[in-house]
Image (cartoon, rainbow, N blue to C red):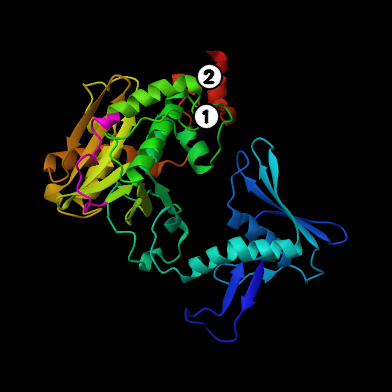
Amino acid sequence: MTATDLVAPDSRGAIRYERTAWGRRYASADGRVREIWLLSVNSVKTRTAAEIAEAAAVAATGLPAAAGFGTPYRPTRAGGSLPQRVRVVAVGCGDGSHTVLADWDTEEAARQYARHAKPVLARTIEADRLNPGSACVDCEALTGCSQPPRMPFLLGTDRPRRPRRRRSVSVSDLRAHAGCPAKYHLTRVLHLKSSEPESVAIRRGRAVDGWLNTQHSARRNCRAGLLPDVLPDLPAEEVGSALRMIAEHAAVCPLDGLPQDEEVRVQPRLTVYDPELDAVVIADPDLLYTDAGGWVWRETKTAASRPWEGRPLLESFPQLALAVLLMSAGVPGGDLRRSRIELELLYQDGSACEELYPDDPGTVDAARQVIASLAGPWASDEAFTATAGHGCNGCEALRWCTPGLDHTTAS
């Protein structure tokens, strides 16, 4: 920790600024070299130049410190001599990987801080825009903040019998919990991740999604664009199927003919707060755009085959159910009568587009039932018991799940 104390409060009312870097801290016996290890749960995590420079600067000038709730950091021991050199090392605790991100003398650490970290810190301090998201979970000011919007009983369930720490949740979380509570807890709460390669479908879907996001962010109409020759991070043998899906999207691209004065937002984060459940609810539409006074929420999904027609659309794609509830309650806004939710399904040999309307009472009621059926078990679960079965084969949490290992060994 390194701190700057002011003689009088500044324009923000602050009298002290603290900078910290969390990680394992080491120093040579003579104090000339310090290291800070930045830990990741699984593999080495990519760090920005600003993060690396800030960690190095704090290691070069700071002191080990402890913090109490709502109180300044306190040095845990008297200051000694400062180092002559600092190293920043990224460490993956899951696979043991490590990378030296910085190995600088203190003068270089100061130069890197001034170049990369100081401008970012200045922008952070000066910013006054509210930016609701998953960080609202730990924010002490949430109860008195105007954001995120309050939507009581959005998830259709009361608080659990026993008090729980405030949590964030998305439809992906709810679906993961419904599939296997243990997998949800291991991968989405503890953030454990398998080192096994992702499936072809996941890689292909991510590649298609990335290309579409780039096109839509530039306001390019995909119908008029040329198909790429390659897609990043996708093996050559998998590119063909992804390109066929991109070609199918071109026929239904929502930007085709969209007037330039309409707003387009690519994968915006929408956040609301359910105070009854004390849960921060997160939604990330693939695309939001305005159309004649209303908002259009589009979800794009790649698939190898058509969904089963006997199952209701909101049950097959519960993210549409949450979209209905949010839009019917005024998020993101606009004229509800002119708003709609679109589901775009892309296959290698075709595409389909379905529409839902958030001003339709029957659709809203059906959406409430879908979300409540998923959120109820999640909200009350305290054990996160594994659901052993055919899904254990290839499960990304299998290595940490004894019931799953037992099932796969016995089968």
| Residue 45 horizontal side relative to residue 177, left or right | right
Q: Is residue 24 above or below residue 341?
A: below
Task: Give SS at disc 1.
Answer: loop
Q: Main secondary structure of the magenta part?
A: loop
Task: Report the amino acid beneath label 1.
Answer: Glu
Which labelled disc corresponds to residue 61? none
Q: Quadrant of residue 54?
A: bottom right
* Residue name at image x 53 percent, y 41 percent: 191
Q: Is residue 12 above or below residue 127?
A: below
Q: Nearer the viewer, residue 270 or 102?
A: 102
Cα separation, mark 2 vs mark 1, equals: 15 Å
Extreme residue toward the bottom, this view: 8
Residue 329, horizontal then vertical, whole percent: 21, 52
Q: Nearer the viewer, mark 2 or mark 1?
A: 1
Q: Earlier in the sequence, mark 2 or mark 1?
A: 1
Residue 378, horizontal then vertical, whole percent: 39, 41
Rendered-image quadrant of the N terminus:
bottom right
Q: Which residues are magenta?
A: 249-263
Task: Write down the residue under mark 2.
Answer: 407
Task: Write down the residue under mark 1.
Answer: 396
Q: Quadrant of residue 53?
A: bottom right
Residue 197, horizontal then vertical, whole percent: 54, 26
Decide if residue 389 is in sight here: no
| Residue 223 horizontal side relative to residue 134, left or right | left
Task: Give SS at disc 2.
Answer: helix
Task: Report the amino acid beneath label 2.
Answer: His
Asked whether the beta carbons under mark 2 and mark 1 sit within 8 Å of each other, the answer is no
Q: Nearer the viewer, residue 103 or 358?
A: 103
Q: Is residue 96 above or below residue 398?
A: below
| Residue 83 horizontal side relative to residue 371, left or right | right
* Residue name at image x 27 percent, y 46 percent: 288
Question: Magenta stretch: residue 241 in it?
Answer: no
